[in-house]
Amino acid sequence: MIRLFKHYVPYAVVFLALLDCALLVAAAEVGFRLRIHQLGSLVDPIDNRWPQLLVYTAALEIAMVAVGVYGADALQSLRRATARILVAISLGVLLLSAVYFLSPQLGFWRSNLLYAMAISAVTLVAIRILLGKMLGSQVFKRRIVVLGAGARAARLKTLAQAPGSAFVVVGYVSMSEANRVIPEAIARDAIYNLADHVVLLNASEVVLALEERRNALPLKDLLRIKTTGVHVNEISTFLERETGRVDLQSVNPSWLIFSDGFSSGRMLSAVFKRLFDIAASALLLTLAAPVIVLTAIAVKLESKGPALYRQRRVGLYGVGFDCIKLRSMRQDAEVAGKAVWAEKDDPRITRVGRFIRKVRLDELPQCWSVLKGEMSFVGPRPERPQFVDDLEQQLPYYAERHMVKPGITGWAQINYPYGASIEDSRQKLEYDLYYAKNYSPFLDLLILLQTIRVVIWPEGAR
């Protein structure tokens, strides 16, 4: 994987994105030349069109990232990739329309744009057909050796076999585990030189997956492996990189303390984030005011009670604040004010409420909380105080998610469906901790773009 601003991107995604950029530039140029030849005019040198070509490419590439063209599911399914490419091109054209309105000199003729769109759609789908299974094959996968043959090693084996995995396990080495669950693992005693064994397997990384590390670390072996140029990692760091989560099953306090992340040198990023929150929330409240009013009328007409309601949530450093939302449930949804998890097909949700939850319209009034500084656009979802009290007792490190400002959207929200149980909360906590640990403006931008995918394909909304 390639690390961009603390966030890891698989080699296959980087390769495909660069290839797509080249195809988009070519599609825009071919579309231009095709239209010029139809008019019988001479074609100017390409140097005169680079700004237009780059703007076209950037707009469509941003749209492709936003709708999840580079997600693991789209890489594995041609049907899903095709659907998302078509949606991305449509969104990209809308973005280009805004750019062309603000800066006409950067635009193509409408006929040029139509040809470029059609050529882009065909070539982007065609390259995925040609590449076929190569994107998910071992060509782009890192080869790793796992030291360990217990439950932790079994987790790595399962993860390697999952669709979209970015690595392949080429060998397991049993380190005298009491409960060995990997039958193909080679005993350490049967290997004369572990460093040579790793090199012969052509591995690029060794992952330490011991069940018990006290007095069990093979320091001499690890040092020799490291000096051969093979990267050595332990399982918590490896899982964080591969899954985009902080794995609660393997992590310990010392790892959180000594690993990189949770940096205090974020003053400039924090100022930028706050300025963005103020500008974006003010603009969105202004533009969305008619939508909020119309939705509030629809809510009011369908069921008794206020269209807007305030709900106490836990914010930064555990301080409570009142979150404003459009009401999507009946007024009597919670008896005596007792917090209740939302369920799938929850009967308390009204018909209008079900729709506004699907397209996230109920979240729009939260922009007021963003403007006030109680929330941010991007961050962990703010939870009810009753839920927080219970979850802090049952989940380790739950309080640490409150070290960053809560958000309307977040890393957990775009990667995991709506959570309504302790297990769901544990999964989302892993994503929240990853965000808190690896925060950067780049990650915020990626989350904001990917939120478009969640709105278009609202999987798991309740």
Image (cartoon, rainbow, N blue to C red):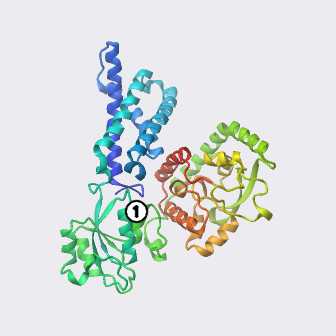
Q: Position of residue 45 (x, y in %)?
A: 29, 23
Image vertical order of residue 162 relative to residue 378, above or below = below
**Split into 4 quadrants, where in the image is the N terminus?**
bottom left
Q: Residue at x 44, y 24 (%)?
A: 105
Image vertical order of residue 91 relative to residue 446, above or below = above
Q: Nearer the viewer, residue 117 or 225?
A: 117
Q: Position of residue 461 (x, y in %)?
A: 59, 52
Q: Residue at x 60, y 66 (%)?
A: 421
Could you tell me how many numbered marks the image carries? 1
Check disc 1 and give the amino acid type.
Arg
Q: Residue at x 23, y 76 (%)?
A: 224
Residue 50 visible to an observer of this rendering = no
**Split into 4 quadrants, where in the image is the C terminus?**
bottom right
Residue 13 visible to an observer of this rendering = yes
Image vertical order of residue 150 relative to residue 373, above or below = below
Q: Position of residue 442 (x, y in %)?
A: 46, 51
Residue 41 placement, left or right of 388: left
Image vertical order of residue 149 relative to residue 81, above or below = below
Q: Nearer the viewer, residue 130 or 94?
A: 130
Q: Position of residue 23 (x, y in %)?
A: 32, 36
For disc 1, the neighbor class at 10 Å (few under 14, some 14 to 19, many from 20) is: some
In the current view of this chain or complex, which residue is farthest to the top?
A: 40
Residue 386, image quadrant: bottom right
Q: Residue at x 77, y 44 (%)?
A: 302
Disc 1: which residue: 241
Residue 194 placement, left or right of 81: left
Tag 1, which secondary structure? Answer: helix
